Amino acid sequence: MNYHITHTTKYMYSEAVPVCHNLVHLAPRTLPNQVPDKFRLLIHPEPYSVSYGKDYFGNDVSYFSIYQTHRGLTVTATSDVAVSAAPEVVPDDTAPWEQVAAQLKTDRAVEVLDAYQYVFDSSSIQRFPELAEYVKPSFPAGRPILAGVIDLTARIYNDFTYDPRATTVHTPIREVFEQRHGVCQDFAHLQIGCLRSIGLAARYVSGYLRTEPPPGKPRLVGSDASHAWLAVYCGEAGWVGIDPTNNVLASTDHITIGWGREYNDVCPIQGIIIGGGEHRMSVEVDVVPPEVTS
């Protein structure tokens, strides 16, 4: 599946900003089943400098600085990306979850050591006893790990309500767990916390999800949004992506920007400004097959 992506973020400030420095995660990541092309970053006002690199997790990042006084900032990222189906993993053929948890503690192979860092708490994902209790029904002794992950995903999907007014990017997962409401970021954080509480490795994935309009209705330009899901290390089966917001395995509808321990590692735009007073932000994302735009 080929996609053309446009992601526009606008900031409006109540007071002038003379200086800002920003770090951007907006370029799709190169993966075996995902090939990005023609990434472009448009910034207004024109930045003093723009540079590109990789972060600790291997994600593509952009850096820019503006040294002219401004009352607004617009960042538009455009990219083309081709996504193909990942190799199918049969859930009941994956290793028992206890075996994978034990492997993470003892195996010193490079790929396992890399996965092991995603077993521990991070600033936004702090484990607590109730998470371990919640996860238990999905992981009885000897259950294949991916079968357990799929069961847990379905339970989160059924037990929690999608509500964009219920949380902010700073809401702790304990509050999400207690109020049973949240958004895709919250559900990804929650499921990661559950899996880490039983010694499994799970990482946060940031990207986009192609959305389909209701039958007979046209697509609404800008109706898509940034999305979040998670990937779980399943031993010999490798990393498998799963989306608790929609109760599905990650597919060709999911476009990956990057991953980390949590949202803060792959926030689309973060930075430092001088001045500015109060500010308002708006985001528009459009994810369409190229033939729709032609």
Image (cartoon, rainbow, N blue to C red):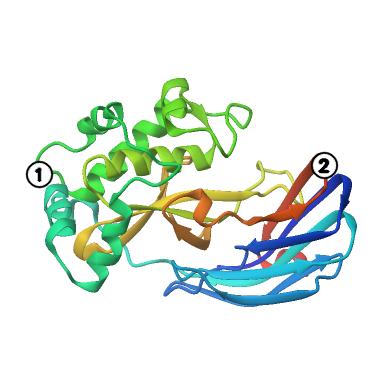
Task: Tell me the SS state at disc 1.
Answer: loop
Mark 1 and mark 2: Cα distance apart in space: 56 Å
Dividing the picture into quadrants, the one containing residue 285 is: bottom right
Q: Residues within 10 Å of mark 2 (few under 14, many from 20)?
A: few
Q: x%, y% of residue 211?
A: 61, 49
**Would you say 135 lies left or right of 242 here?**
left
Asked if residue 206 is positioned above or below residue 186 in the image, the reply reads below
The amino acid type found where label 2 is placed reads Gly
Per the image, the residue denoted by label 1 is 142
Q: In the drawing, what numbered circle is on residue 275? A: none
**Would you say 42 lies left or right of 90 here?**
right
Quadrant of the snapshot with the N terminus: bottom right
The amino acid type found where label 1 is placed reads Gly
Q: x%, y% of residue 203?
A: 38, 54
Count of marks overlaid on the render: 2
Q: Which of marks 1 and 2 is in front?
A: 2
Asked whether the residues under the numbered discs 1 and 2 touch, taking CB atoms below 8 Å apart as contact, a structural biologist would say no
Dividing the picture into quadrants, the one containing residue 198 is: top left
Task: Tell me the SS state at disc 2.
Answer: loop
Q: Residues within 10 Å of mark 1 (few under 14, many from 20)?
A: few
Dividing the picture into quadrants, the one containing residue 82 is: bottom right
- Identify which residue, 68 or 76, lies in the foreground: 68
Q: In the drawing, what numbered circle is on residue 277? A: 2
Which of disc 2 and disc 1 is earlier in sequence? 1
Quadrant of the snapshot with the C terminus: bottom right
Q: x%, y% of residue 12?
A: 85, 47
Q: Which residue is drawn at 42% across and 75% down?
A: 32
Q: Residue furthest top?
A: 179
